[in-house]
Image (cartoon, helix red, strand yellow):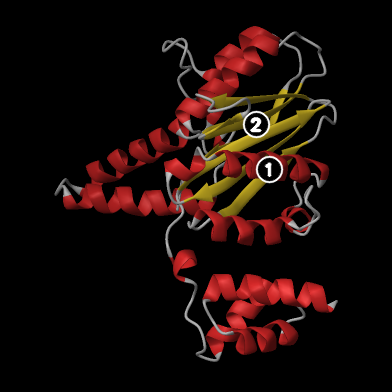
Amino acid sequence: MSSQSQIEKIKQLREITGVGFKDCKIAIDETNGNIDKAIDFLRTRGIAKANKKMERVAADGLISIYQSDSNYVMVEINSETDFVAKNQAFINFVKEVTEICFKSKGDMEKTVHSKMKNKKTINENLVDLISKIGEKITFRRCAYINNNESENFSYIHSPLKENIGKLGVLLKVKNPSKVDIKDLGHKLTMHIAAMNPLSVDVNDLDPKLIAKERTIIEQEVKNSGKPSSVSQKIADGKIKKFIEENSLLNQIWILDPKKKVRQILQETFGKNEFKISEMKRFKVGEGI
């Protein structure tokens, strides 16, 4: 690491932690310039508490989508407030990170160490942006879908700018029959945005999630005081309903409450083969 690079790293670490130059230099030397590890180094030695900004919750921010040749990437970058999310410097950062993430095919580790137009890495620019704006900012997650034997679709709900908003969806459909599904694909992404399915079909749901829900439902029914023979049937019915409501193909179609998504697809494809092979839905701050 060059002396100039070392000084820059020390400066960044000081901005984040508020620790003196000497201790920051030691931390940078000990961790070969890795800022995150340097912060941990200082904390384990009792020199610095976690950066006050980074202790705060960043549950606002933006979802951004970039596509080329039907390959898509979607990223979520968080800020603490909606005010910062609408800041042009933040928006520009989000857009450039999304494009770099696309080139990295959704490899987050590779993305954060890639250089931006100003020749600094994304991680370095993130530190600079935190210092400039004064809020916690995090690159939370990304998703990438390729165009391998598929038709892909995207959707941003109520976009703040083109392909930038608070809620985004990516959808990958294998359609060997070549049935025209451009309109259906768009409607499906809107449905996913609105109904938030957790899986494509029943068998795709996480068994741990189902087990957790079953435990909650069984306890709820047990507390109702009903006989065990009745309560078990009620619990089974509720868990069946939970599974159906959270798997895309079994959900009620938002554009026709008399039909389920599976029926809509069957009407479109008939006996032709099709498969929803992947779907991603990001909502800003969800789960934070």
In the image, taking residue 260 as reference, residue 93 lies left or right, namely right
Question: Would residue 280 be seen by someone viewing this image from the given angle?
Answer: no
Distance from the alpha carbon under mark 2 to that under mark 1: 8 Å
Q: Residue at x 55, y 88 (%)?
A: 44
Judging depth in this view, the residue of 108 and 122 nearest the camera is 122
Judging depth in this view, the residue of 214 and 102 nearest the camera is 102
Q: Position of residue 222 (x, y in %)?
A: 22, 52
Q: Position of residue 205 (x, y in %)?
A: 55, 43
Q: Position of residue 199 (x, y in %)?
A: 56, 37
| Residue on which disc 1 sits | 143
Secondary structure under tag 1 reads: strand
Q: Amino acid at mark 2?
A: Leu
Asked whether the residues under the numbered discs 2 and 1 touch, taking CB atoms below 8 Å apart as contact, a structural biologist would say yes
Q: Amino acid at mark 1?
A: Ala
Secondary structure under tag 2 reads: strand
In the image, taking residue 242 as reference, residue 205 lies left or right, namely right
Q: Residue at x 28, y 39 (%)?
A: 234
